[in-house]
Amino acid sequence: MKEEIADDKSIFGFWVYLMTDLILFSVLFGAYAVLRGNTFGGPAPRDLFSLSSALTSTLVLLTSSFTCGLAAIAAQRGKRNGTIAWLTATFALGATFLTLELAEFSRFVATGASWQRSAFLSSFFTLVGTHGLHIAVGLLWIVVAVIQVRLRGLTPATTSKLTRFTLFWHFLDIVWIFIFTTVYLLGII
Amino acid sequence: MNERLTIKRYTIGFILSVLLTVTACLLIFIHDQSGHVIFTHPFLRVSVVVLALAQFIVQLIFFLHLGSERGPRFKLAAFASTIGIVLIVIIGSIWIMNHLNYNMMSSTQQMNAYIQSQDGL
C-alpha cells in the first residue's frame, strides 16, 4: 500500500512535467502559427511538404504508441520477455520515425530550405526538431529500460519507470498529431 | 492509478486513431486528385482540425487513461489548467500578431515602404 502511494506520487510528478512540456510545445506552435506565412521569397509549406511522407511518419509513430501500450500491459501481467519484445518493437518504430524525419530535414537543407532561409523555416525546424529531440530522448530511455528489465526483472521500481515512459511516449504521439495537422496538412491545403 | 490495462482498450484506441489520420489524408488526397474541385479549402481546413481534436480526445481516453483515476482527479485538474494556458498562448499570439501595425496597412507596397523606412530592410 505504501509502495502504491509512492508510485502514485512519482507518476503524478511526471504528469506535471509533461504538462510543462505541453506549454513549451504550445509556445513553439504559437510561433509557427504566426510565422508560417513569412517565407521571405523562399519555399512555402505547400512547396516542401508531401502528404504521403507525412502520413507514413504518422502511422509509424501511432503504431509505436500502440506497441508501447502493449509493453505496459505485458509488464503489468509480469511477462518479462513480452515486455522486452514490445519495447524493442517500440524502439524500432521510434528509430524509423526519427530516421524519416532526419532524412526529410537533410532533403530540405540540400534544396536550400534550411532554418536560415526564412522565419517560416526557422520556426518549422524549431517546432519539429524539438519534437524529434524528445523522440531521441525517448529512444535512449527505452534502451535503459530494456537493460534494467533484463538485469533486475519486473520489480515495482522498473514497472513504475515503464509506466512513466509509456506516459511520455503517448504524450509525444499526441503532440505529433498536432504537428501533423497544423504543419503538414494545413500547410498542404 | 494502477488501473488494470487491457489490450482491448489499446486496440480500440489504435484503430480509431488510424481511421482518423487516414480520413484526414484521404480528404486532401481526393481534393488534389479532383484538380482542387471536390471540397472547398475552408471545408478542408475545418474538417482536418476537427479530426485532429477528435484524435486528441481518443488518445487522451484510450492511451493516457485520462479521467479514469481513482480518488481526487489531480491529473485531470492539472491537465485542464494547462490546456487553459496553452489556449491563451496560442490564440493570444495569433490574435496579437495579426493586429500589429505591419498587417494593418492596405497594400503590400505600402507595407514594404513602411518596413524599409522603419527598419531599413
Image: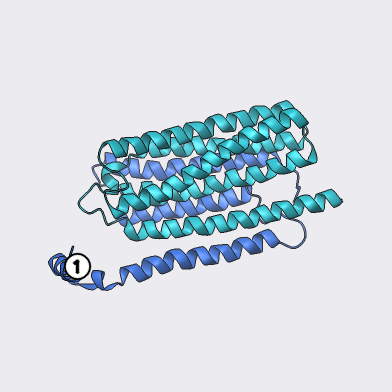
Chain colours: A cyan, B blue
**Residue A22 seen in this snapshot:** yes
Left or right: residue A96 versus residue B34 is right
Image coords of residue B64 (percent x, y): 63, 49
Q: Which residue is labeled 1 in the image?
A: B115
**Residue A52 seen in this snapshot:** no
Q: Which amino acid does label 1 sit on?
A: Ile
Q: Quadrant of residue B100?
A: bottom left
Q: Residue at x 75, y 63 (%)?
A: B72
Q: Which residue is drawn at 64% across and 43% down?
A: A165
Please tell me which residue lies in front, A8 or A54. Answer: A8
Please tell me which residue lies in front, B9 or A1. Answer: A1
Image coords of residue A130 (percent x, y): 46, 48
What's the chain of the residue with tag 1?
B
Image coords of residue A147 (percent x, y): 68, 30
Task: Reply above or below: A123 against A60.
Answer: below
Image coords of residue B16 (percent x, y): 54, 43
